[in-house]
């Protein structure tokens, strides 16, 4: 486990307190005191969680993340959420409702557990898709229809996640298996 630094503790405390104050919106003694107690509790629980390793590379602490790429990814992701939301609206709003539920499994070649977590959460955030499971490098995703999962298996979204960590343009997705529901 990594040694705690005063800088990291201070930065974490200030960030969490700022979030608490922004969310509570009340700046009296009682609310600030509750905020301090809550933030201290969250930090204590988080410290204990860091003792456990859930993935072999889960302690990489996002060192490889190219933070200046995150705003670009967030803007792109927001656009994808809007586009996918409009697509889902068209599908479920259509009188014929062309839903073709599908389970898609695929392997990814991403540099860390954090990259896989970002991809899994991005898939789930996008309307029409849901990350069901991640085991090692294998993802299982439920999709509303073919258009919902195309951006995943054609490497569009996984490459955007890869760009957050590496300056390369290599294939990320492999071994795609698509199972269309019978209903």
Image (spheres, rainbow, N blue to C red):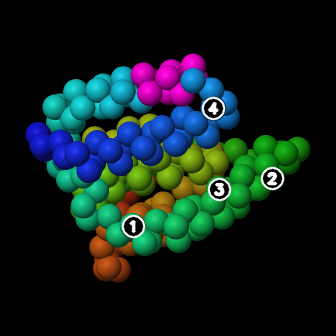
Query: Crowdedness of circle 2 by 10 Å Cα count: few (<14), some, many (20+)?
Result: few
The mark that comes first in sequence, 1 or 3, is: 1
The quadrant holding residue 56 is top left
Query: Which residue carries the number 4 mark?
Result: 27
Query: Crowdedness of circle 3 by 10 Å Cα count: few (<14), some, many (20+)?
Result: some
Q: Which residues are magenta?
A: 30-38
Query: Crowdedness of circle 1 by 10 Å Cα count: few (<14), some, many (20+)?
Result: few
Say whether residue 44 is left or right of residue 181: left
In reply to whether residue 35 is colored magenta, the answer given is yes
Inter-mark Cα distance, 4 to 1: 32 Å
Determine whether 19 is above or below 84 in the image: above
Q: Are marks 1 and 3 in contact (CB under 8 Å)?
A: no
Q: Position of residue 178 (x, y in %)?
A: 45, 51
Determine whether 50 is above or below 160 in the image: above
Residue sitting at x 85%, y 45%: 93
Q: Are marks 4 and 1 in contact (CB under 8 Å)?
A: no
Query: Which residue carries the number 3 mark?
Result: 81
Query: Which residue carries the number 2 mark?
Result: 90
Q: Position of residue 60 (x, y in %)?
A: 20, 53
Inter-mark Cα distance, 2 to 3: 14 Å
Query: Crowdedness of circle 4 by 10 Å Cα count: few (<14), some, many (20+)?
Result: few
Which residue is the extreme one toward the right? 95
Say whether residue 140 is left or right of residue 150: left
Residue sitting at x 38%, y 39%: 13
Which label lies toward us, 4 or 1? 4
Residue sitting at x 66%, y 64%: 79
The mark that comes first in sequence, 4 or 1, is: 4
The mark that comes first in sequence, 3 or 4, is: 4
> Does the image show residue 45?
yes
Secondary structure beneath dot 4 equals: loop
Q: Which of the two residues, 95 or 134, is positioned nearer the viewer here?
A: 134
Secondary structure beneath dot 3 equals: helix
């Amino acid at each position: 486990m990594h040694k705690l630094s005063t800088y990291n503790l201070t930065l974490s405390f200030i960030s969490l307190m700022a979030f608490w104050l922004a969310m509570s919106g009340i700046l009296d003694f009682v609310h600030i005191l509750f905020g301090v107690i809550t933030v201290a509790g969250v930090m204590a629980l988080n410290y204990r969680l860091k003792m456990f390793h859930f993935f072999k590379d889960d302690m990489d602490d996002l060192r490889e993340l190219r933070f200046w790429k995150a705003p670009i990814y967030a803007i792109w992701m927001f656009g994808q959420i809007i586009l996918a939301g409009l697509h889902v609206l068209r599908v479920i709003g259509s009188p014929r409702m062309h839903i073709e539920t599908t389970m898609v499994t695929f392997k990814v070649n991403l540099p860390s557990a954090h990259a896989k977590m970002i991809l899994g959460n991005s898939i789930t955030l996008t309307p029409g898709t849901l990350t069901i499971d991640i085991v090692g490098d294998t993802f299982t995703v439920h999709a509303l229809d073919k258009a919902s999962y195309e951006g995943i298996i054609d490497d569009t979204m996984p490459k955007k996640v890869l760009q957050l960590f590496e300056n390369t343009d290599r294939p990320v997705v492999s071994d795609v298996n698509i199972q269309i529901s019978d209903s």
